[in-house]
Amino acid sequence: MDYRESLDYLYGLQRFGIKLGLDNIRQILCRLQNPERTYPIVHVAGSNGKGSVCAGLACILLQAGRRTGLYSSPHLHSFTERIRIDGQAISKAEAVALIESVRAASDGIPVTFFEFTTAMALLHFQRQEVEVAILEVGMGGRLDATNAVRSQVTVITPICLDHSEHLGADLATIAAEKAGIIKSHIPLVLGQQPFVALQVLGDKAKDLQAPVFRYGREFFVETVGNGFDYQGLDLSLTNLQSGLYGVHQHHNLGVALATAEILLRQGLELPTVALREGVAATRWPGRLEWWREERTVLLDGAHNEGGAEVLAAYLASLAVAGIRWVVGAKASKDIANILRPLLPLVDYLYCTVPPVEDAVPAENIARLAGEFGLAAACFDDSASALAAALADRRQGEIILVAGSLFLVAAAREYLMDQEGA
């Protein structure tokens, strides 16, 4: 098969939908002779910030010269972005070879898309002889395909209500699903958590005798001017410069630094300068991303209440003349809770649908905006919505694109196409 045919086969696996459980992935990995046992793994779960933590840690390891694998989802533009070695997405040829290998190993197993891609990543990291692999949980934790591994460090970033149809309708239940990645006697790094979630995570860690390193207790950060200071397990670093926008990213990078310190304690060579340079070099497209570093279009994948609150705090810190919001969301998301913290800061909405099969109708978003007293227009696709927002923009105003990473990806593609026109 060529690359297109391979992707068609891979995306065809989505007919099996989301099937939480570990039996299939374990069987496939066994047939592949358990590649995940040949390198240390950092396993990262959470509702918000886990992608930024993974990106920050990967960049720190790269700056230290450690060969690093990163598995994350979803991708923005190309499937190959999901599996990276030292910051570089796999090639199309590598993707084809991996699909062929995993397809053979999964013969007779009704494998899902995410189970298949997880096996691909774990096999690729073995073939590339990585020194550390970073795995981002797809959803939840306990029954997520990535939980078939035994990690060397586990990380849980802030938890909020998200994916409730699969994980539960309250924080305690969702936290219990995230806690499923905690392993016996394996260090656990915790980002800032709601009290209810913290209780659940702490009880699980205690039961498994997992050492806990908690933000605000064993490590913390303090924003100072345009940078931040980090007080960690063994290290104290001042005047760190973040490669990511937003004060909340100081917290995420603090979690990445604490995780790096644990790897250092476990014997991985990480010069202190690499921690500082890694933080400064971290990039994570689509998350508080100013397009081309110009203060005109702000792209953010905020897709739940927690992400919207963080985005609102960042917007409130800006000195702008107005905000025009291009918004769309998947039908599974609580759009009212996404809108609530942001609408007081916004002047006009351009409601559309992200390029997914099941999206919130643009008219529904416009109706909710109207209940808040905001004017809104509806558009059939993200390109026309963004084009209208850019045409309407006045001096000093910014265009916000947020509500779904799929929407952000479509907006980035439109902006790239306009630059190439």
Image (cartoon, grey):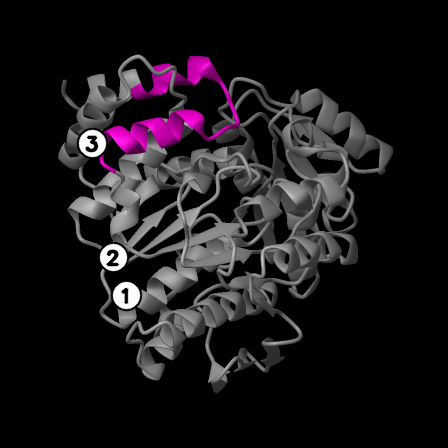
- Decide which of tag 2 and tag 1 comes sooner along the chain: 1
Give the spatial CA distance, label 3 vs label 1: 24 Å
Image coordinates for residue 269, horizontal then vertical, percent: 28, 76
Which amino acid type corresponds to the residue marked 3 in the rendered image?
Leu
Numbered label attached to residue 62: 1
Numbered label attached to residue 86: 2
Q: Is 279 situated left or right of 337 in this image?
A: left
Q: Is 103 situated left or right of 288 in this image?
A: left
Which amino acid type corresponds to the residue marked 2 in the rendered image?
Asp
- Helix or strand or loop: what does disc 3 sit on? helix
Image-quadrant location for residue 29: top left
In depth, the one of 294 and 71 nearer the eye is 71
Image coordinates for residue 329, horizontal then vertical, percent: 61, 31
Circle 1 packing at 10 Å, graded few (<14), some (14-19), many (20+), is many
Give the spatial CA distance, label 3 vs label 2: 18 Å
Query: Looking at the magenta stretch, what is its main secondary structure?
Result: helix
What residue is at 32 percent from the left and 77 percent from the top?
A: 274
Give the spatial CA distance, label 2 vs label 1: 6 Å
What residue is at 29 percent from the left and 41 percent from the top?
A: 122
Q: Is 286 situated left or right of 163 in this image?
A: left
Above/below status of 405 relative to 341: above
Reading the image, the residue beneath label 3 is: 98
In the image, the segment drawn in magenta is 10-33
Which amino acid type corresponds to the residue marked 1 in the rendered image?
Leu
Above/below status of 216 relative to 324: below
